[in-house]
Image (cartoon, coloured by chain):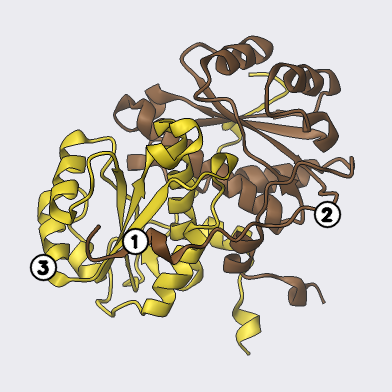
Chain colours: A brown, B yellow
C-alpha cells in the first residue's frame, strides 16, 4: 500500500514550504539520518567537502538559540534543529563562496528531504549576519574559521502552512537576457 | 504502469549526479518548463525573488559559451543550457549574499528536477570568477548589476556516469561542534 503514497520529486519540490508551526512530536534519529544523508548528496565543487552539520535536540540549547537569533523563535516547538556549517578551507580552492554554495545546496536537500518524509522545516538565516554567526559560534563552540550558515528547525508540521506558487514566466529569458 | 516507475525524492536526491556526457537528443520545451517551475519553487528569503533564468539552445551561443568558459566544454553536446542569474537588488535587504543563496537553492532544484525527469545536468561555475561573469554578461547582454551564478547544461545522459556516495558520519556533530 505504501507505494501508492510515493510522490514524485517534482511534486515534493512544488509542495515544499517553510514550516514554522509544529505539533511537538519529536523527529526520530532514523529520520534525521535520512535527512543528513540527503544533505551530503548535494553537489560539491571539484568534490571537496566543505560542510559539517550540528544536530540539536537539547531543550536548553534550543531555547538559548531561539532567544538569541532573530528568526528562530519556533525552534523549541520543532524539537530538533540542524545547523549547516560551511568550512571554506575544505572547499574548492579554499573559497568561502564555493563553501557557501555547496552548503546552500545541502540545505535545500534538507528542506526537500523533510518534506518528502512528511516533516516540516524552514531555513532560518545565521549567515551573513556577523552578530548571529558569532553568537552561534559561542553557544556551540564552533571554531572561528567555520561559518554557521543557517539553523533549520525540523519537526512534525501542524499542517496549516501551504506552499507559495512563485512561478513567473517573466523570470525566464530565451537565448539572451 | 508509469506509477510503478516513480522514485521517491530521497532516492532521486541520492541518485543525482553530475552528468557531462550526453546523447545529443534535444530536451523538450515542456521539460524545460518543468525544470524551471522546480527552480522557482526554491525558498526565497522573506519572499523577495532574486532570480532570473536564461535558457539557451542556439548552437552558436552554446559553442561561444563553451569556448569561453573553463568548465562548460560539454555544453554543445547537451543541447540546452540554463544560466541562473542572481539579482541582489531584488533579494532580501538588497543583499548579494541572499541573492546567491536563493539562486543556489533554485539551482539545486534544477539539478534534482533534471534527475527526476531522466535527464542529466551539471553545475558549471561562473560566479565567483569575475572574468567568467564578465564574459557571460557580454555574450548574453546581461546587465552589470546581475550576477550569472552558473551555467547548467541539460540533456539526455549517455548513461555511464554514477552518483558519488559522499555520506560521512564524521561530518555530523551532536548537540555541540
Residue under the image location 47 percent in, 35 percent down = B98
Q: Position of residue A112 (x, y in %)?
A: 62, 53
- Left-right relation of A40 to B133: right
Q: Is the Cβ of the residue at disc 1 closer than 8 Å to that at disc 2? A: no
Q: Position of residue A123 (x, y in %)?
A: 62, 38
Front one among B88 and A41? B88
Residue under the image location 46 percent in, 39 percent down = B91
Find numbered disc 2 in the image and state the secondary structure of the residue it sits on: loop
The residue carrying mark 3 is: B60
Q: Is the Cβ of the residue at disc 1 closer than 8 Å to that at disc 3? A: no
Q: Position of residue B34 (x, y in %)?
A: 48, 71
Spatial CA distance of label 1 from label 2 is 37 Å
Examine the rendered structure and indicate whether residue A65 appears above or below residue A98: above
Q: Quadrant of residue A3?
A: bottom right
Label 1 lies in what chain? B
- Which of the two labelled residues, at mark 1 and mark 3, occupies the earlier sequence position? 1
- Left-right relation of A53 to B116: right
Spatial CA distance of label 1 from label 3 is 22 Å
At label 2, counting other C-alpha atoms closer than 10 Å, the crowd grade (few under 14, some 14-19, many 20 or more) is few
Q: Position of residue B109 (x, y in %)?
A: 49, 56
Of tags 1 and 3, the one toward the viewer is: 3
The residue carrying mark 1 is: B19
Residue A8 can be seen, yes or no:
yes
Find numbered disc 1 in the image and state the secondary structure of the residue it sits on: loop
Of tags 1 and 2, the one toward the viewer is: 2
At label 3, counting other C-alpha atoms closer than 10 Å, the crowd grade (few under 14, some 14-19, many 20 or more) is few
Spatial CA distance of label 2 from label 3 is 49 Å
Mark number for residue A159? 2
Find numbered disc 3 in the image and state the secondary structure of the residue it sits on: helix
Amino acid at each position: 500500500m505504501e507505494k501508492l503514497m510515493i510522490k514524485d520529486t517534482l511534486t515534493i519540490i512544488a509542495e515544499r514550504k517553510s514550516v514554522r508551526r509544529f505539533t511537538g512530536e519529536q523527529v526520530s534519529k532514523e529520520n534525521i539520518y535520512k535527512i543528513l544523508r540527503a544533505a551530503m548528496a548535494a553537489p560539491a565543487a571539484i568534490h571537496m567537502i566543505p560542510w559539517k552539520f550540528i544536530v540539536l535536540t537539547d531543550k536548553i540549547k534550543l531555547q538559548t538559540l531561539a532567544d538569541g537569533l532573530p528568526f528562530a523563535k519556533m525552534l523549541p516547538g520543532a524539537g530538533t534543529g540542524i545547523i549547516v556549517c560551511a568550512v571554506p578551507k575544505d572547499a574548492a580552492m579554499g573559497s568561502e563562496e564555493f563553501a557557501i554554495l555547496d552548503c546552500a545546496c545541502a540545505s535545500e536537500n534538507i528542506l526537500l528531504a523533510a518534506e518528502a518524509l512528511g516533516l516540516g522545516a524552514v531555513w532560518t538565516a545565521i549567515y551573513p549576519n556577523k552578530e548571529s554567526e558569532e553568537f552561534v559560534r559561542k553557544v556551540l563552540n564552533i571554531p572561528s574559521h567555520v561559518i554557521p550558515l543557517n539553523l533549520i528547525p525540523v519537526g512534525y508540521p501542524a499542517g496549516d502552512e501551504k506552499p507559495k506558487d512563485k512561478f513567473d514566466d517573466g523570470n525566464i529569458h530565451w537565448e539572451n537576457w
